[in-house]
Image (cartoon, coloured by chain):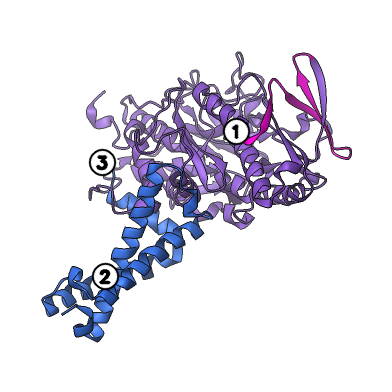
Amino acid sequence: MPASFVSDDAPNLRRRDFLLSVGAAGAAGILGLSAEPLYAAEKTASKARIVIVGAGAAGLSTASRLLQRLDGAEITLIDSRAEHYYQPGFTLVAAGIKSKDYVISRTSDYLPKGASLISSSVAEFDPDAKAVVTDKGQRVSYDYLIVATGLSLEYGLIDGMDTSMIGRNGMGSIYHSPEAAAATWQALTGFMEQGGTGLFLRPATEMKCAGAPLKYAFITDDRLRRNGTRDKARLIYKAQNQTLFSVPIVSEKVRMLFLDRGIDVHYDRVLISIDLGKRVATFQTPEGMETESYDFINVVPPMHAPKSVKESPLSWKTGQWATEGWVEVDKATLRHPRYPEVFAVGDVAGVSKGKTAASVKWQVPVIVDHLLADIRGKTSDAIYNGYTSCPLITRLGRAMLVEFDYDNNLVPSFPGIIAPLEELWATWVIKTMGLKPTYLSMLRGRA
Amino acid sequence: MKDMELSAFFFLFQEMLGGWFWPLFLFAVIVSVAFVVQSFRNRNWMWQASARVKAIGVSGGVLFVILITLASSSGFTDAGGPIDFWLITVLFGFGYITTTTVAYTVCGLLNKEQCNGK
């Protein structure tokens, strides 16, 4: 591939840039800067029809970057939700650090000039005809398709679960919505006073931000200590398998921290039903069913691809992700193997890592580079290496900046400076002050 | 730091400061120009500023650290590793230099004899 087609914003060059710009919140002025414009690349003239299904973090970022690089292309986003959620902030809302307004804005605030938005959801993917059909019956044809739908929270797979009860009778669930995150905080404040048994868990499916359930266990522990009621509570983390985190070295670190904080761990426990009235949760274990009474529980539902994706020709039909329905893609290029004009990005992509905003940051330049190369009749060698990061809060005021790739390698951006397995205030400052501005810059294609 | 572009910083701080960005940017430009004018007019430099101006600068450094702890819903007692203490030092330094610059400039414009330490 000609060197000129390797984008300046190839992800392997930009990971440090991302975190440096986050860190700039607290350490501006100590970094070397160049005055080179962020997007100096010339625009490519094209009449391509590019449809992006989903106007969340992945969809908006992709649209912004494409519009910076294409002249004349017709870029259409399809999404029925008018609100945009800053999902990395949900945990802070549920921790009582931020109000729910902190995470809510409007999709239209970030819609790049030149892109159009169809306010519908996609009911059907027809990749053989290169078209999608909305729930209102509108058929939209494309030359290139970006699937960025996000995922579906499958609360219905937990028998007895009722999302309208979130925040009541000791049941919280952060992932559901900003309102649910705030309601979870209300439930936690009651638990902080009364104590009892607190249950924390994660589903056996793939999930977005797999560190979040761990964070909330740590936050609960810290809230109880600050409230002087830690001795009134027993905290139990129900791991879905034999690990606490997919990266072994991080799992071991979390195990030690849980031991230090007095948080019990029960392995191989998957929540399958809940009695919200009696406050009893039932877990599937290798030995059979196990019930556990609780006074507080943070329910994390199974997560699947949206139904329209799962039932489309685009999803995995065999292998570990067939049941959950994620889009089948090459893990390096995020391109569909049978429909080369189709890419998937963000939570819906069927890859083993990458259901975080940080992943989106590194995935989007890859698919944009490949799409541009296609338009130009060239090829791209940009790859996504599975990079993702998780500011893993271990108490209020401290977090570990965990960054890793497909192979579970730790890939710290600042080796020797910000240690990935060290609980640091600097990481907390990045999480609370720097992450959201960087995320918003990403939506606008500026970071 | 080859790939660290100035524009990325610009946009980041624009998102971070929101509606405060441009007023603060304008304020910074005005103070910078006034500072240079003041320095040349007095034939004096900031490190020769009076103890009073330096004391204001120390207060500014402390206040900036407190401001960051408030904005991040934490406290500097949360510091857990060497980078945290460096960060506190850098924050203090930024607050100190910024506040001293403003104080030196404003004070000098009002009364140069008391402010430049002569």
**Neighbour tally class for label 2: few under 14, some 14-19, many 20 plus, Cα within 10 Å:** many
Give me the chain that's blue.
B
- Position of A321 compared to A19: left or right? right
In percent of the image, x 58 and y 55: which residue is there?
A102
Residue A410 percent location from the top left of the image: 43, 27
Magenta residues (range): A261-287
Q: What element carries label 2?
A: helix
Amino acid carrying label 1: it is: Asp
Q: Pointer 1 and pointer 3: residues touching (CB < 8 Å)? A: no
In percent of the image, x 39 and y 47: which residue is there?
A23
Q: Earlier in the sequence, mark 3 or mark 2?
A: 3
When asked about the image quadrant of residue A198, the answer is top right
Select label 2 or label 1 by which is in front. Answer: 1
In-front residue for pair A361/A68 = A361
Q: What element carries label 3?
A: loop
Mark 1 lies on residue: A260
* Dot label at residue B101: 2
In-front residue for pair A249/A368 = A249
In the rendered picture, chain A carries what hue?
purple
Rounded to the nearest whole Å, what is the CA distance between mark 3 and mark 2?
Answer: 28 Å
| Circle 1 chain | A
Looking at the rendering, in which quadrant would you find the C terminus of chain A?
Answer: top left
Amino acid carrying label 3: it is: Met
* Dot label at residue B1: 3
